[in-house]
Image (tube, grey):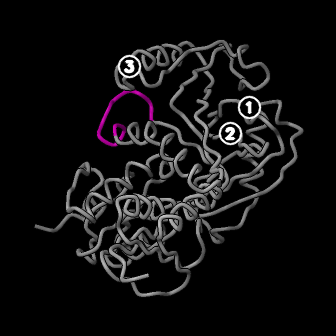
Amino acid sequence: MAIPDVTVLGAGILGLSAAYACARRGARVRVIETHHVGAGSSGGVVGALAPHTPEKWNPKKQVQFDSLIRAEAWWTEIAGATGCDPGYARLGRLQPIADDRALALARDRAQQAETLWQGRAAWHIRPATEFANWAPVTSTGLVTHDTLTARLHPAKACAAMAAALQGLGAEILIGDHAPTGKVIEATGAAGLAELSGHFGVQVGNGVKGQAAVLGYDARTLPQLFVDGLHIVPHTDGTTAVGSTSERDYTDPTGTDALLDAVIARARAAVPVLRDAPVRARWAGLRPRAKSHAPMLGAHPLRPDRVILNGGFKIGFGMAPELAEMAADLILDGRARIPPEFDPAASLPKPTP
């Protein structure tokens, strides 16, 4: 490749998505990844593209909504261009309604969703019997069913995006290579650790997650969110359950009794999973900025570069919209970024 217009450091979902958005606009793009495509949390197994609740609306929720709406065309285009299935499907999500208070809250959210989701998705209240044995245990006999939530297979999605990039003439290099051209740093937990070390305070960190893949085929059914767990059926006939959120750990990629507890909770919440065999166990670090929001803007240590990081638990869902924002910034110098996403939101405040 000739000297690239844009170099992206990091081949996780945010880096690949930003690279793809730039390449689609005709830029010459190079991606440099230290380990392999989809390393870290982007190579996980859960893949829930789930919205925040339709209430107390803010810019982050609006960007997430826009991204979830954009996602179907985004992933369909990638699958069509490559023949690689990212496992995307917008099949919605079920959540149990525990009691009268939860029912009143669900009704309020359903009403707000009519406006906030602009008629493009809905938040329904349904009898659990409509979903037969796939419904989670619920004392009221009711569940919420939102139609905005989607799923994909993280590792397969990253592989599909890498193939799409190469189809657009982009280059993906593995190892230690010097960046040239304009630079986007999307280096995940390692990038946040660098910032924390420089400033001497927690700017962000890697939160360990453990998840499992069960041998149960529910590929045409909505995913579930119950007891704090995502239970996500995939196109390959498996169902993923996760995840833990661990701030303290010694082995970032090892699984242990905490995952056993996750599996037990999932089986208790959805009895049809009780005899499903465990096909795989996974663990990795998910980047979480101090602000809890994605981080996008001038890099605090290298202001001539753009940083794209964070997105704890919501990175895959927000990737399409964040990618377009990053492309606007790096290619056109146009910043249409909510203030909450500014890296300064996670940095220590200057002393007077």
Q: Quadrant of the N terminus?
A: bottom left
| Residue under pointer 2 | 231
Q: State left or right for residue 17 relative to residue 161.
A: left
Q: Which mark is residue 73?
A: none
Q: State left or right for residue 350 relative to residue 258.
A: left
From what the image shows, is residue 296 above or below residue 134?
A: below
Q: State left or right for residue 160 relative to residue 280.
A: left
Q: Which comes before the other along the chain, label 3 or label 2? A: 3
Disc 3 to disc 1, how far (Cα)? 28 Å
| Residue under pointer 1 | 269
Front residue of this view, candidates 288 and 161: 161
Residue range highlighted in magenta: 52-62
Q: Which comes before the other along the chain, label 3 or label 1? A: 3
From what the image shows, is residue 272 above or below residue 316?
A: above
- Figure quadrant of residue 285: bottom right
x then y, percent, for residue 262: 72, 46
Q: Residue at x 36, y 78 (%)?
A: 4
x then y, percent, for residue 37: 58, 69
- Disc 3 versus disc 1: nearer the observer: 3
Circles 1, 2 touching at the beta carbon (< 8 Å) = yes
Front residue of this view, candidates 267 and 62: 62
Main secondary structure type of the part rendered in magenta: loop
Q: Which comes before the other along the chain, label 1 or label 2? A: 2
Amino acid found under the numbered disc labelled 2: Ile
| Residue under pointer 3 | 112
